Amino acid sequence: MGVDESVSVSEDAGVGVGESEGVTSIAAAVEVLSAVGGAANVVRLTRCWSRLRFVLADPACADLEILGRLRTVAVVVFQGGELQVALSQGLVEVFEALRLQLTSSAGD
């Protein structure tokens, strides 16, 4: 699994995604990761300014319906061989939480 670690995140990233509504960045990352088919299905994770970008081992394992219904997800689209997920807020925090989960699961 490849994770683009070239993206820097400031230490004062602020409140995570939806924490005021009871959804932390970690919880949002767990939900997104589950909906894309789990850590084993993620070949590569990167991000741009507006979207999480997943390259999946088996795109059919991703449940786009569930992913699109998550409270933190605004847009889901496959484009250029990537599953792109725009979040309503907290993109950087959720990306970092996903990166940590993927890195820790790669060491298992």
Image (cartoon, rainbow, N blue to C red):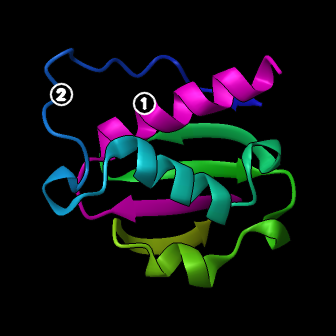
Marks 1 and 2 in Cβ contact (< 8 Å): yes
Disc 2 residue type (three-letter): Ala
Disc 1 residue type (three-letter): Glu
Residue in view at x 35 percent, y 72 percent? 71
- For label 2, the residue is 13
Answer above or below: position of 18 versus 105.
below
Q: Which of 17 and 85 is in front in this view?
A: 17
Q: Position of residue 6 (x, y in %)?
A: 47, 17
Residue 80 visible in this rendered orientation of the protein: no
Q: Which of the 4 quarters of the picture holds residue 87? A: bottom left
Residue in view at x 54 percent, y 50 percent? 30
Residue in view at x 40 percent, y 53 percent? 51
Q: Nearer the viewer, residue 103 or 86?
A: 103
Determine whether the residue tagged by mark 2 lies in a helix, strand or loop. Answer: loop
Q: Which of the 4 quarters of the picture holds residue 3? A: top right
Say which quadrant the C terminus sits in. top right
Answer above or below: position of 7 versus 23.
above
Q: Position of residue 77 (x, y in %)?
A: 54, 73
Q: Would you say residue 103 sits in the magenta stretch?
A: yes
Residue 77 visible in this rendered orientation of the protein: yes
Q: Position of residue 67 (x, y in %)?
A: 54, 73
Answer above or below: position of 61 versus 65.
above
The total of numbered circles placed on residues is: 2
Q: Would you say residue 7 sits in the magenta stretch?
A: no
Q: Is residue 91 left or right of residue 12?
A: right
- For label 1, the residue is 96
